[in-house]
Image (spheres, grey):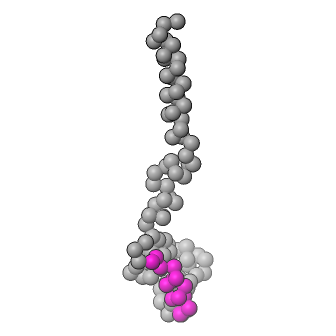
Amino acid sequence: MKYTQFASLLVLPCLLALSSCDKKQPAEQSKAGTPQQTAAAEPDWCAEHGVPESICTRCNKKLIAEFKKKGDWCKEHDLPESQCILCNPELKEKFEAMKPKEGK
């Protein structure tokens, strides 16, 4: 066997072993921009309306139908009942607790 062939036989398995190390990461970590990472990077908060952005019907009118379908709607204030702090003042404290802390 020639020296170059012998060297190839030694180097090839080493290269394969080294290249496979990167593939041992969990699936969540190996995919850039997964929903979990995006959600963690961007707080789910509507600062203008004081509720999570994902349920803010004033910013996303498409959500209204789902709330109405569930029977969760305040006709008087045109908001989900579960977000209407005028009818349910105790909700203000709940949403304040959910608000992201400054600097995080």
Question: In the orientation shown, which residue stands out farthest toward the right?
Answer: 70
The residue at the point 53 percent across, 93 percent down is: 89
Asked if one can make out residue 56 in the rendered structure from this viewpoint, the answer is: no
Q: Position of residue 49 (x, y in %)?
A: 42, 82
Judged left or right of residue 47, residue 13 is right
Residue 62 part of the magenta-drawn span: no
Most foreground residue, 75 or 32? 32
Locate the C terminus and report the quarter of the image it occupies.
bottom left
Question: In the orientation shown, which residue stands out farthest toward the top?
Answer: 1
Q: Is residue 85 above or below residue 47?
A: below
Asked if one can make out residue 94 in the rendered structure from this viewpoint, the answer is: yes
Q: Position of residue 12 (x, y in %)?
A: 51, 22
Magenta residues (range): 88-101
Question: In the orientation shown, which residue stands out farthest toward the front?
Answer: 3
Q: Position of residue 2 (x, y in %)?
A: 48, 7
The residue at the point 38 percent across, 81 percent down is: 48
Classified by dominant secondary structure, the portion drawn in magenta counts as helix
The residue at the point 45 percent across, 54 percent down is: 33
Judged left or right of residue 43, residue 91 is right
Instruction: Count how many numbered circles sit on residues in the image.
Output: 0
Most foreground residue, 25 or 61? 25
Most foreground residue, 53 or 26? 26
Q: Is residue 18 above or below residue 26?
A: above
Q: Position of residue 88 (x, y in %)?
A: 55, 92
Most foreground residue, 3 or 27? 3
The residue at the point 50 percent across, 48 percent down is: 30
Judged left or right of residue 73, residue 47 is left
